[in-house]
Amino acid sequence: MNLDFSFYNWAIVSDYLLKGFIFSLKLTGSTTVFGILIGTLLALAKLSKHAWLSRPAILYINLMRAIPLVMLILWFYLLVPLMLGRPIGAEPSAYITFTAFEAAFFAEIIRSGIQALPPGQSMAGLALGMSPLQTMRLIVLPQALRHMIPVLLTQVIILFQDTSLVYAIGAYDLLKGFETLGKNFGRPVEAYLLAAAVYFLVCFLLARCILFVKLRLSVKGLAHD
Amino acid sequence: MIKIQNVSKWYGSFQVLRHCSTSVAKGDVVVVCGPSGSGKSTLIKTINALEPFQEGEIWVEGTAVHDPKTDLPRLRARVGMVFQNFELFPHLSVTENLTLAQIKVLHRSKDDAVRKGLSYLERVGLSAHKDKYPAQLSGGQQQRVAIARALCMDPVVMLFDEPTSALDPEMVGEVLDVMTTLAAEGMTMLCVTHEMGFARRVSNRVIFMDQGSIVEDCTKDDFFGAEQSRSPRAQDFLAKILSH
C-alpha cells in the first residue's frame, strides 16, 4: 500500500477543512450548553414529586435513549419539513436534534449527581429556611454539577465524535471536509487517516482537560473520591 | 413556646413516634436521650417539619407546624438546627456558609450578613478560619461553624441532633463548651445527645424515649437523682450509659 500525502498543503485547510471543523465545534459547543440546560430541567422534572412533571420527563428520557442518534437525525430532517411544509436545512436540524438527544443523556448524568449527594445537604438548606427551589439552586446543583464535571466532559467527547453522524443529512462537518478532500484529490485513504488524527487530537486534548479538572476538584476537597 | 401534642408518625406500617406530647418553655434546655432507634432524632425534626408526621399537633411560638398551609421556610428560618454530620456546604467558604441564608432567606444586605456571621464566628472562636473551606477544618471546628451558621438566623430555639456523635473524642469538649455558653445565655435548646455529663451540668429537663414513646419527661434532678423512681427502661439505659 502506497500512502501519498503530497497533496497536502496549508491551502486545503482553509479550502476544505476549516468550515467543517468550525461547524463540528459549534455543534458540540451549543449542544453542550443547551443540552446541559435542558438536561438539568429534565433531571429536576424526573426527580419531582409531581407525576405531571416526572412522567413526561421519564418518558422523554427513555425514548431518546432508546433511539439511535442517526435515526433521530434522519427522521427530524425528513419528517419535520413535511409537517411544516418547508425545508429547515441540514444545519438547523442538526442543532435541534443533537440538543434534544443529548439533553436526555445529560439529564441522567445530572440526576445521578443530584441523588449521589448526601440528603443531609438539602436538609441543611431547608432547615435554614430556604425554599426547596433555593436549596436545589444554591446547595444541591452547584455541588452535583461539580462532581459531575468529569462525567459531563466525557459525554462531550462522545458528543464531538457523534457530530460526524450529520453525514446522514449531508451537513458539512469535519469528516465531510476530509471526505470531500479525499475525493477531489483521489486520495480517500490518506484523507480518512488525517481525519482520524484530527479527531484523536481533539478528543485527547478534551480528555486531558478532564484529568486537569479532576485534579483541581480533589485539591479543593470537592471530588467524590 | 413549643407545644407537642399527641404526635404519631409511621414509616409505612412501622410506627416511629407514638402519641408524643411535651412542651418547652422559653429558656428551657431539654436533653432528649434514649436507645438508638427510639425516635429521638425523628421527634426533634418534626418541630421544624423536616420530618412530616401523620397525627397530632405541634405549635412553635403560635405557628401550627401540622397545618399544611403553614409557610414552612418561614418557620424553619426561626428554628436553628445543628446536625450530627455538620452539613456545612462544602462548595462555600466558612463566611459564605454563615451568610448565604441570611442574604437569601432573611434578605439582609451582604455587609450586615458578613458582620453578623463574623461576630458569631468569633464567639465560637474561629475567626481565623473565615476564608477556609469546610474540608480544611476539623470535625469539631466544622460543628462550631455549623452552630454559628444556625445562630446567624436569630433563632427562637435551637435543635441539636446528636451534635457530638460524629466527632473524635478530643473534639467533643469544644462543641459542648459552645453549647454550654449558649445555654447560659438563655437560649432555648432541645438536644438529642448521649452526653450525660452535659445533661447533668447544663440541662434543666430530660426526656427519655423508647420505641417511639416518651417514657420519661422530668427535671434533670429527678432523672439523675431519684433513679429508683424512674421506669425500668430508663434505669436500664442509665446503667448502661453511665457504667463506662
Image: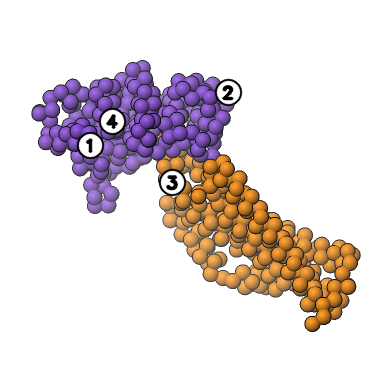
Sort mark 4 into few (<14), some (14-19) or many (20+) by Cα contacts within 10 Å: some
The residue to which callout 2 is attached is B111
**Residue topped by disc 3:** A118
Q: Is residue A32 left or right of residue B165?
A: right
Disc 4 marks which residue?
Answer: B195
Q: Residue furthest left?
A: B228
Eyeballing the image, is B239 above or below A110?
A: above
What colour denotes chain A? orange
Q: Nearer the viewer, mark 1 or mark 2?
A: 1
Residue A207 or A89: which is nearer the viewer? Answer: A207
Q: How far apart are the two marked residues, 2 and 4, measured between alpha carbons? A: 38 Å
The amino acid sitting under disc 2 is Asp
In the image, which disc is placed on residue B128?
none
Q: Quadrant of residue B190?
A: top left
- Residue at image coords 42%, 31%: B140
Q: In the figure, the purple chain has which letter? A: B
Residues under numbered marks 3 and 1 in contact, where contact means CB atoms less than 8 Å apart: no
* Residue type, numbered disc 1: Gly
x, y (%) of residue B202? 28, 22
Q: Amino acid at mark 3?
A: Pro
SS at mark 3 in the image? loop
In the picture, the disc for residue B34 is: 1
Residue type at mark 4?
Glu
Q: Chain of mark 2?
A: B
